[in-house]
Image (cartoon, rainbow, N blue to C red):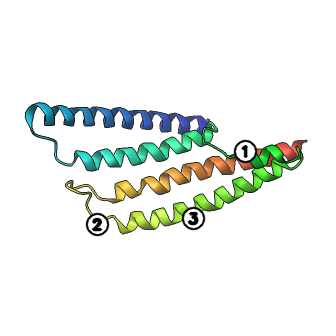
Amino acid sequence: MLKKTVTFLEEILTSVLMLALVLLTFLNVILRYFFSTSISGVVEISGLMFIWICLLGSSLALKHKGHIAVDIIVNRLPEKSKPIYEMVIHLVMIVTFAILVYYGVLLTIEAVHKTLGNTSLSQAYLYAALPVGFFLMLIRLVAEVNGTLRNRRAD
């Protein structure tokens, strides 16, 4: 139930951010083209939303196995070796994501008192997308490895 709720919230948040990004950009283009003015800070806020969309979307893509993969090696392996290879890849990804979460948190803390361009927003809102996005991916991978190990034990 919790996994479905988190996925639902990710999908809703990503969709809302995408819609807001498109509308804000469209509004700013209209204001510039017809009224020779623009909204201050739109570029920074658009960048902020885009980063969050990318990292939340990456987590959703990981859930739906939507990331690209080079499978030339996997296709040449014997069937018995494929699960081991996939497990090693998942473990490397887990370690990488854990490192990115750790350094993302440090970067976010460091950026708390810096402002984002022309806005009064903290840069921490931008950098927080890193630990949040990679933490969500980390949780998904750990759950997948755990499920794989449980299935193996059941067999």
146 or 63: nearer the viewer: 63
Secondary element type, mark 3: helix
Residue visible at 89% across and 46% down in the picture: 78
Circle 1 is placed at which residue position? 71
- Amino acid under label 2? His
Residue 66 falls in which quadrant of the image?
top right
- Structural distance between the alpha carbons of marks 1 and 3: 25 Å
Which mark is drawn over residue 99? Answer: 3
Left or right: residue 29 versus residue 59 is: left
Residue drawn where x is 14% and y is 37% of the image: 32
Q: Vertical placement of 130 versus 75: above or below? A: below
Q: Earlier in the sequence, mark 2 or mark 1?
A: 1
Q: CA distance from mark 2 to mark 1?
A: 44 Å
Would residue 70 appear left or right of 134 to someone viewing this image? Answer: right
Identify whether 39 is placed above or below 16. Answer: below
Across the whole image, how many numbered discs are drawn on residues?
3
